[in-house]
């Protein structure tokens, strides 16, 4: 697996975690009898955001490195 491929897989994983936490939070208002642990869900959403941003930074750094290499070769 390549570095950009691993970063993309990490971004997709983070997106899935974010969406699941958001669905639990949104579903809590529909079913008032079910308790939603907002603190746990918010921590999961923040962790997913940080994971997504970290993987996006890997992709950006790879792109910057490729541009620099092409400039050196040109």
Image: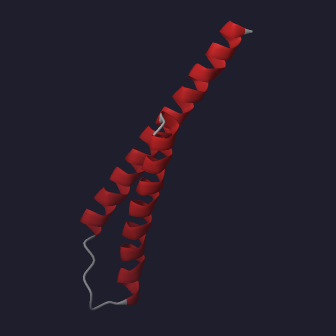
Q: Is residue 42 above or below residue 56?
A: below
Q: Is residue 30 above or below residue 36?
A: below
Q: Residue at x 50, y 42 (%)?
A: 5
The quadrant of the rendering that contains the N terminus is top left
As rendered, which of 58 and 18 lies closer to the eye?
58
Q: As drawn, which residue projects farthest toward the front?
A: 1
Q: Is residue 27 above or below residue 59?
A: below
The quadrant of the rendering that contains the C terminus is top right
Residue 16 in percent (x, y) is at 43, 62
Left or right, 58 with respect to 41, comes to right
Q: Total of numbered circles in the picture? A: 0
As rendered, which of 71 and 52 lies closer to the eye?
71
Residue 68 in percent (x, y) is at 63, 15
As rendered, which of 74 and 59 lies closer to the eye?
74
Q: How is the image coloured?
A: secondary structure
Q: Is residue 57 above or below residue 29?
A: above
- The answer to which quarter of the image holds residue 50 is top left
Q: Residue at x 27, y 87 (%)?
A: 34
Residue 55 in percent (x, y) is at 45, 41
- The answer to which quarter of the image holds residue 54 is top left
- The answer to which quarter of the image holds residue 63 is top right
């Amino acid at each position: 697996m390549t570095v950009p491929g691993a970063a993309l897989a990490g971004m997709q994983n983070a997106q899935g975690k974010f969406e699941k936490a958001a669905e639990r939070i949104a579903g809590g208002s529909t079913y008032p009898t079910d308790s939603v642990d907002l603190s746990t869900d918010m921590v999961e959403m923040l962790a997913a955001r940080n994971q997504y941003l970290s993987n996006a930074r890997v992709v950006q750094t790879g792109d910057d490195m490729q541009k620099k290499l092409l400039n050196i070769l040109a």
